[in-house]
Image (spheres, coloured by chain):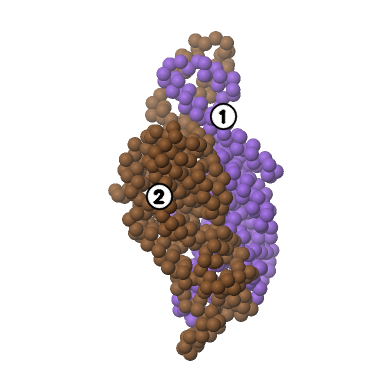
Amino acid sequence: MNSALAEELLGRRLIVCAGGGGVGKTTLSAALALFLARRGRRVLVVTIDPARRLAEALGVAPEGNRIVEATRTSAGGVLEAMMLDCRLTFDESLARHARSKEEFERVRTSHLYEHVATALSRTHEYMALEKLHELHHDGTYDHIVLDTPPTRDALGFLDAPQRMLDFCNERIFRWFVPEDEGSRLLRFGRERALWLLGRVVDQGNLGPIAEFLGALAGLFGGFRERVRDVQATLRQDGTTFILIASPGRSSMHEALYFGRKMRDYGLRHRHLLVNRVFDYPFSERPLPPLEALFSQTLGLGAARAGRLITACEKTHQRLADLARRDAEQLAALASALPDTMQLTSIPQLDLEPVELDAVGTLTDFLFGTIPGPGEEP
Amino acid sequence: MSTTRPEMTIVTGKGGVGKTTVAVALGMSLATAGHQVLLVEFDSQTGVGTLLGRSKLPTEPVELAPRFRAVNLLATDATERFLRRQLPLPLLFNLVAQSSALRSFLRATPGLDEMFLFGALDALLQEHPELDQVILDAPATGHGLTLLRIPYAFAQFVTFGGPRRLVEGVLAMLEQAQIYVVTLPEELPVSETLELATSLRRSIPVPLRKIVLNRCEEDPFDDEEFAFLRTNCRTAPAEEFLGAVTRWRNTLHRQSRQRDRLGVLGLPLVSLPALPGRDLDRAQLGLLAEVL
């Protein structure tokens, strides 16, 4: 029973799982959420990964932004799951903040809208925050577990509030609002800035961009407050970041880098989970004497017996090698970790990682088997 | 300014599948075959640098091996480069450089960083006409796809002047490009690869040419041998070993099932062997290069 981790989870409303790609972050997010549900809590697990992995991990197929119940526990807890649909969230957000229907339509029908909404890169992070904010303040859930995209993008995720604030705060948006006449000085400033921007992006491109941004600028008023709220939410005591890594130098590098970054941002992070650590009972001790075992058997010629022993030895080598490497990596990581962080090692489990069973086994491993008979798959 | 552009291979795939390893191995194999190769990363924190024991790649091309160079292009440099080109008059450039509003506008506009990075790469290739093979180590899948969509998105609304020339240069560069997707023989990476392939084919004209299946383990036992093993492990430690072998074989069987799923794509599938250890040295990279 990992009581420190259990306590940390039970005491936080917002749990953000962060780490590199391919470390099993999605499945682990679900496992942490399942633990909370087993303790009778109402939990939502959200993924902002553009690839739809959470659905597979939970064995449900939530459509974008639709919350689906994954399981109920005998303790009265509920685990629900949601895949974030960025486009839908963006649409909803614009509709909510628009001063008028016409303004919203002007943005929505713009040439540029498609790209801002779906194609351009940081939208995922903006939209994740928007949704997070909504869910957090909605109060339906005791806990929200957020599965973030792989590290480099998760950093973008951390930067997103500030970027978005910078973006919203810029006077430059006001320059695009045609009806915002302002003072003479402001008008002069605007003309000069637009002229400069025209030089940068070329005058001919400015028209459609200006029109789009002018409409968008009107929508940012409410957004600004939201972004500030989300920033505060990420920093508050009720929020914790769980770092997730797997053995391997690059994944460890990422975890440490991410940890440093979170310290800089003043975000709470106490736990590092190292997932899929290869475990082999004979990594540090000799194999049982196979020759003796096989020589007394009938029906196997000497040549075949020899081949079998070679295969066993080869397998032994390979498995011992994998286990030793992981142990070394883990030791290196542990020594590089600040004292404030606890490292938990999770072995590679013999399971298809795409079923609720696998999620449950992970939960069992981390927190012990807490009665799950009332759980419905 | 338009010259023939080198062939480009965009290596993409989910994070942690060994994408960078494959990109480096591919670069080595091309360099060994006599090509002048440049490996490119965009705003990388780790990537190739970590793989080769450096902390980070420099922002100017550095030689990794004969005929094989690598570079990490930074969005900040790329933006600066665009502005200097667009605003050749120092006075004008300085006005923009001093305008915090304009700069943060440029920084915050979605996709702009990436567009400038593509532009910087195109410019770099023009400066180095000796290069005939470029490998772009693209970011992990979801955003890798986003990255590739950006130039085509910009092409639709950037229609004038310098920015247009930048976009056109990038589109011309991508005309010589192909995509390799790197994945692992595991359930989730394979599912993601199938999704990625569909999205790529639907939304980007750059052709998907190859799937590279990394870290394929070999099963040392045939079924008969394993059955024999099972009936003959009777002592406690022998059973413990049998347990480990059974788990291992389950893993390998899952791997081959996953490999089969990729068949629907109808693409060449290159399997790379799993090599001892989690991290590779140069000799092992050479081995992968040979397979590629």
Name the colour assigned to chain A in the rendering.
brown
Q: What residue do we see at 57% from left, 50% from top?
A: A63
Which quadrant: the C terminus of chain B? top right
Does residue B107 appear left or right of residue B208 in this picture? left
Residue under label 1? B219
Can residue B245 be seen at all in this image of the molecule? Answer: yes
Residue A221 location, x and y as percent? 47, 72
Chain at numbered mark 2: A
| Quadrant into which the N terminus of chain B falls | bottom right
Mark yes or no: residue A252 visible. Answer: no
Residue extending farthest to the bottom is: A184
Residue type at mark 1?
Asp
- Badges 1 and 2, same chain: no
Res B10 quadrant in image: bottom right
A2 relative to A65, above or below: above
**Chain letter for mark 1:** B
- In x, y percent, where is residue A325? 43, 37
- As helix, strand or loop, the secondary structure at mark 2 comes to strand
Q: Which chain is purple in the rendering?
A: B
Secondary structure state at the residue bearing disc 1:
loop
Judge by depth and name the residue closer to the eye, A113 or B70: A113
Camera-near label (1 vs 2) is: 2
Mark 1–mark 2 distance (CA, rounded to whole Å):
44 Å
Q: Which residue, given by chain and number where applicable, does mark 2 sit on?
A: A143
- Callout 2, which amino acid? His
How many numbered marks, from 0 up? 2
